[in-house]
Amino acid sequence: MALNLSSQGLGGPVPPCIGNLSTITSLDLSNNTFYGSIPTELGRLSRLQVLSLWNNSLQGNIPSLLGSNPSLVYIDLGANQLTGGIPQFLANSSSLQVLRLMQNSLTGEIPASLGNLSSLTRLSLAINNLVGRIPESLSNIPSLERLILTMNNLSGSVPHSIFNMSSLRFLEMANNSLTAQLPQDIGYRLPNLQSLILSTTQLSGGLPVSLVNASKLEMIYLVSTGLSGVVPSFGSLPNLRELDLSYNHLEAGDWSFLSSLANCTQLTMLFLDGNGMRGSLPRSIGNLSNLLVLSFAQNNLSGHVPGSIGNLSQLNEFYLDGNNFSGSIPGSLGQWRQLEKLNLSHNSFEGSMPREIFNISSLSQTLDLSNNLFTGPIPMEIGRLINLGSISISNNRLTGAIPSTLGKCVLLEVLHMEGNFLTGNIPQSLMNLKSIKEMDFSRNKLSGKIPEFLALLSSLQALNLSFNDFEGLVPSSGIFGNSSRVSLKGNHRLCASTPGLSLPLCPKLESKGRKKYFVLKIAVPIPLSVVVIILLCLVVILVRRRKEEPSLQHSSMHIEKMTYEDIAKATNGFSPVNLVGLGSFGAVYKGILPFEDDPVAIKVFNLKQYGAPKSFVSECEALRNTRHRNLVKVITLCSTVDPTGSDFKALIFQYMPNGSLERWLHPEDHGHDNKRFLCLGERINIALDIAYALDYLHNQCATPITHCDLKPSNVLLDLEMTAYVSDFGLARFMRNTSTAVPANSTSFANLKGSIGYIPPGKPNYEPILFS
């Protein structure tokens, strides 16, 4: 009777009552989540032949009663958390054919008594903490096919008799501290060998040529074994799939071994890294058409890469880094359609970067062309690598601007462009790199302001902009709030708003700081005198008349035309994250336009709201006829239809990072917790800015304008706390006296403005102090 409960999602301790199933011959509880110790009651199952507890979370020692069952043929306790040593009593299971104890935490030495298991065909003790020597007695097992001892702490010399076990098909002892001497006739002694994995085992001498006579070989891993001499020709191994001879002292000779590998039609992986091989790659490399992975990294190879390399159309990974290759990269690489990793770094490749590389759309993990001699601009085709996770083109001689198309590589996590001669700004399109973790533009000639969007990249963990020519104010939020993750040194024209980044404070901020300190220093001892003087100054300013009315100079600047799609893209689809505030006639969003370096405020009108279309027209008319340093600057507008065919109207203004005066005066009403309040000096400066704006509107415009809705929420503050009057949706042109409200009118329909801020009196042609 067999009980198979494999992969059923079962958990908890293995129930001891299972020992009552006296007639059971096979028990399979593998691939579940059982924990606790193996119940000793299993030893009572005298008819049990197969026991599989693989891939659970069982702990403790292997119970001794298992050794008293002469019927056991198959024991698999692998991939658990078992401890203690391998019990001697297991040698009593004379019928045992398979013993799998790998992936546990077993300690101690391999019992020599295991050599008495005359029926054993598989012994797997890999990935434990076993120590000591390999018992020579294991070679007494006549039918042993698999000896798997990989990743332990075994030491000493591999018994020579192991290499006489003609039944062996899998001999794997890698990642121990073993030494061995491969017999020169190993290929004849182990004719059935399919897998030879002896990596990190110190092998003396060369690689035995007779190995090519083990015609059933499929895998050879002899990494870091100290082998030397010329690589033999393995062309007589038709089943060879994986060959790794990395980090030895092997030589290429006349490269005949590479040509012979064309006969190994099953070969998919070839690693020859770190051998110090010299010479040039032969054209015959193009005959290995079934390769999936090819690596010649960390050698001394030179010359040109042959164009026949393009024939390896199945390649997933290709590594030539750390050699002395020169010339240009062959364009035939563009024929690869399954490549995911490409590393050609640390060579002497020169010329322009081949555009063909950037057409390999399958590149999804790594593209490393760093530390070469590439020149010219970065091809715009780089934007086609939309699936790529890591790009490094650092330490070349590249010139020109960073391509804006790079912003299409939205899955990028690592971007390294340091050590070139790149110029211009960091393109705004890089704001689309939402997954970016590392970004390095250091040691170039980039200039302009550091874009604000870098502070919004929440995944960014390391940013290096050092030794460029950036200027202006450094953002203070996001990654810029952690100086250990940002490097800005060598940019002598940068400044900061806070001392956290070890940069000088921006000059305007320092000057403003001194001004505040001076005002406060004077105001404290004589507050009443200062207030009186300031009020007198306000009266003088507001009542003075200009003798000359300046003519309006309309800007000759090009006004960008905006579409609905432009507005939607700039606001991330009118995302709530971009929403700044709501008004009577619409909403205001923060956004980034492709032709503007700095963020903008986008006022989108709700045309279904009564009065909104008229408000749009009024605001356009007012802003078209005004220009003053204390009036909010309009950049452009959008008047079109949305995808549903409905009218769509929006105005784009200069963005004010310090929000409205309302939020500073009443932060508790807006859910803000300002760390500081407006000081007296700032309040005076803001009052003056508003007065200048009103004086301009009432007394200096060709046609006087009354705002009709002046209130703190319509006064915006920039980074330096300069005030700007905004929102002209209710503004009125006072062209003649006929536009005035009749003196005897008492209708509320004539009132304009917000409750609490409606000016006393009625607007008329006479200059007024209220709007």
Image (cartoon, helix red, strand yellow):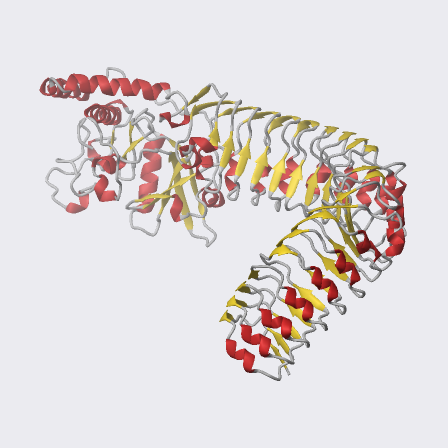
Q: Is the C terminus in the top left, top right, bottom left or bottom right quadrant? A: top left
Location of residue 159 in the rendering, given as x and y in whole percent from the top left corner: 78, 52
Report x, y in % for residue 471: 46, 22
Q: Seen in the image, is 664 located left or right of residue 180?
A: left
Say above or below: 726 vs 193.
Answer: above
Q: Is residue 219 left or right of residue 622?
A: right
Query: Residue 625, image x and y in percent?
Result: 34, 29
Residue occupying the point 87% across, 42% down: 284
Image coords of residue 12 (percent x, y): 48, 70
Is residue 404 shown to the viewer in this render?
Answer: no
Q: Nearer the viewer, residue 603 or 668?
A: 668
Nearest the viewer among 367 and 89 is 89
Taking the image as shown, residue 515 lies to the left or right of residue 605, namely left
In front of the other: 463 or 577 = 463
| Residue 684 appears in the rendering | yes
For the image shown, how many numbered marks are present on the structure?
0
Question: Measuring 35% from the left and 49% from the top, which residue is drawn there?
Answer: 607
Rendered residue at 22%/43% (across/down): 669
Quadrant of the drawing holding the N terminus: bottom right
Nearest the eye: 107 or 375:
107
Q: Is residue 258 above or below residue 173?
A: above
